[in-house]
Each structure stands twice: as C-alpha cells, then as structure tokens.
Image: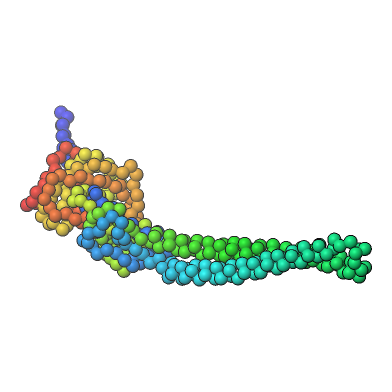
C-alpha cells in the first residue's frame, strides 16, 4: 500500500522595510549646487520657524562673490565718473578745434576777397602776397577741419571705450550676483521649516554651519499637515510587495502605537543608496489611514508589509 504524505504550505512571511515620514504639501529644500563639495551652510532658518513665500530659507557659502559685488559696484561708479571727466575734456578740445576752424574759415574768406583784386589795380608785390595768403588760409582751413574731425572721433572713441569697460564690469557684477542667487533657496510657499538629516558619511541633523553635499535634501517647507511615508525595499524583498497591499506602520518617536496604511506606489527600477551599503532599493510611497498620532516629517518608520490578503492592524500594540 502506498502512503499518502501531505505537506502543509509554509505561510507567507511579512516584509519589514525602513521608511520615513514625508509631508505631502511640502517644498523640498535642496542644497544649492557648487563646484566643490561638501559645502558649508552659512544660513538656515531655525527648525519650526514659519516662513513666507519669497523668504530666503537656506544659503551656502558663495565664495568670493559676496565680497566681489561691492567692489565691482564701486569700480562701476568710479569708471562712470572717470569716463564722464575724460569725455568732457575731449569735448572741450573738440569745441576749441571747432572755434579754430571758424577763425580759419574767416581768414580764408578775407583772403579770397583780397585775391579777387585785379593785378592792374595793385602792385605786383601785393598781388603775389594776396595769392600766397589765399593758399595758406586754404591749407589752414583743411588742417583745422581735420583737427575737428579727429577731436570728434576721439570723443566718440572714448565714449565707446568707456561703455565697453563699464559693460564688462556690469557683466562681472551680474555674474557674481547670479552666483549669490543660486547659493540661496527661496521659499515657494508659506509654511514651517523642518530640517533634515545628512544621508552621507557625515551624519546628523542638518543645521546652520553643517556640511552637506550639493544637491542633497536639507529639509522641507511644510505647508499643511498631510503626511505619507516613503519606504525603501531591497531587491530580494520586491517580489513580496504589490500596489494597494496593506501595511502596518510603527514610528520610533511614538512607541507602542501603529497606523494602518497601503502601498500606493512602487518604483519601476531600484536605485543605490551608498549610505546603506552596496544594495539596491525600490522606492515605495505609502498612504496612511486616519490617525491621531503627532507625526512630523523626518520621523523614522518601520513598515511591516503583510502578505497579500492579510488585514492591516492599527491602534495600540499590546
């Protein structure tokens, strides 16, 4: 007789993930980009302080730009004053050249009048003298006219040279001003500032004076109380997770209490998180059911993803 052996299927195991509380209606405060890293935060609004749209929330060290702008402003003002002085002096010379031309033209008119006297009415010596004076005054007028053209050209050239030099200084000032602007984070909404934590080897909360990497998240401007949870799952754990799967959420800051939730989103491809090692992680967004816990962005969360079909629990953990 053949014996029939029944093997009971092992129950599916819950998947435990690490996550953090995130504000849904929040502006991400990202450390401004820089040519070097890490960068030092020179100004950061204290945590919990309310800010308005347009306020400066965070500023990193802009290097020499902060000191270069006043210097360039002074150089621009000094350059404009010097240009005005030099142009005025050249314009005076141009007026003097114009007056000399007028005098030469008056002499030429007189010489032309004398040169028209018939030779039989005056002596030959006077006739030759009048003709010579006509030649001289004609050449003198041509010379004075060239002097006037050169003086006017010098005025225009000095104006153009001065404008180019001022434009160069203005361009440098605007460049450093742009660096100053890119070294700041401006609030795009009214809300409360919440500081984040360094996710690199430095560790610790990010505050004024902290060092952090350009482009990393330094905190948030939270405009309402709506929260969700961002969690990360190692590649081997991904197979046990699906969208709309119920989860239990336990918060380190609120021991003994759990909140039920559901997976709302799972990223299509894993990303590396160097601060956690060599593994690759899928990103999950989890919505929370109604609760009364005093949650804050940045709180660490333990996510227990129950097998599909299992009910989520909430309330006080016995």
Q: How is the image coloured?
A: rainbow
Residue 195 place in picture, x, y as percent: 25, 60
Q: Quadrant of the N terminus?
A: top left
The residue at 16%/47% (across/down) is 248
Any part of residue 210 in sight: no
Residue 162 visible from this viewpoint: yes
User: Is 114 situated left or right of 88 in this image?
Assistant: right
Q: Is 188 situated above or below 81?
A: above
Image quadrant of residue 247?
top left
Q: Residue furthest top?
A: 1
143 and 271: which is toward the camera = 143
In the image, residue 73 above or below residue 250: below
Q: Going 21% across and 39% down the picture, which residue do you hit?
A: 244
Q: Quick check: 95 left or right of 23?
A: right
Tell me which residue sits at (31%, 60%) in the image.
Answer: 56
Front residue of this view, candidates 65 and 130:
130
Residue 58, by quadrant, is bottom left
Q: Residue furthest front?
A: 121
Query: Which residue is located at x 40 percent, y 65 percent?
Result: 62
Residue 40 % position (x, y): 35, 67
Please state if 57 lies on the left or on the right of 308 as rendered: right
The quadrant where residue 14 appears: top left
x, y percentage for residue 223?
23, 52
Residue 258 image point, x, y percent: 13, 50
């Amino acid at each position: 007789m053949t014996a029939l052996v029944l093997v009971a299927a092992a129950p599916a195991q819950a998947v435990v993930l690490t996550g953090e509380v995130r504000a849904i209606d929040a502006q991400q405060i990202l450390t401004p980009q820089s040519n070097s890293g890490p960068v030092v935060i020179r100004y950061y609004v204290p945590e919990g302080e309310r800010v308005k749209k347009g306020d400066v929330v965070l500023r990193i060290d802009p290097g020499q730009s902060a000191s270069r702008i006043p210097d360039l402003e002074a150089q621009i003002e000094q350059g404009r004053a010097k240009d005005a002085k030099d142009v005025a002096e050249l314009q005076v010379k141009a007026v003097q050249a114009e007056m000399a031309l007028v005098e030469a033209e008056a002499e030429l008119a007189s010489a032309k009048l004398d040169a028209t006297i018939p030779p039989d009415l005056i002596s030959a010596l006077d006739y030759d003298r009048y003709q010579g004076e006509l030649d001289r005054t004609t050449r003198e007028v041509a010379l004075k006219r060239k002097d006037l053209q050169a003086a006017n050209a010098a005025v225009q050239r000095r104006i153009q040279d001065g404008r180019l030099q001022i434009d160069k200084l203005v361009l440098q000032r605007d460049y450093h001003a742009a660096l100053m602007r890119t070294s700041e984070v401006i609030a795009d909404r009214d809300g409360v500032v919440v500081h984040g934590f360094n996710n690199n080897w430095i560790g610790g909360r990010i505050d004024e004076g902290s060092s952090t990497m350009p482009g990393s998240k330094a905190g948030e401007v939270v405009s309402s109380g709506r929260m969700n949870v961002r969690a990360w799952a190692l590649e081997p754990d991904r197979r046990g997770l699906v969208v709309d799967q119920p989860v239990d959420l336990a918060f380190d800051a609120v021991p003994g209490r759990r909140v039920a939730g559901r997976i709302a989103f799972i990223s299509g491809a894993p990303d590396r998180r160097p601060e956690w090692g060599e593994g690759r992680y899928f990103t999950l967004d989890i919505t929370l059911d109604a609760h009364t816990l005093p949650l804050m962005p940045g709180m660490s969360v333990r996510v227990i993803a129950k097998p599909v079909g299992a009910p989520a629990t909430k309330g006080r953990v016995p």
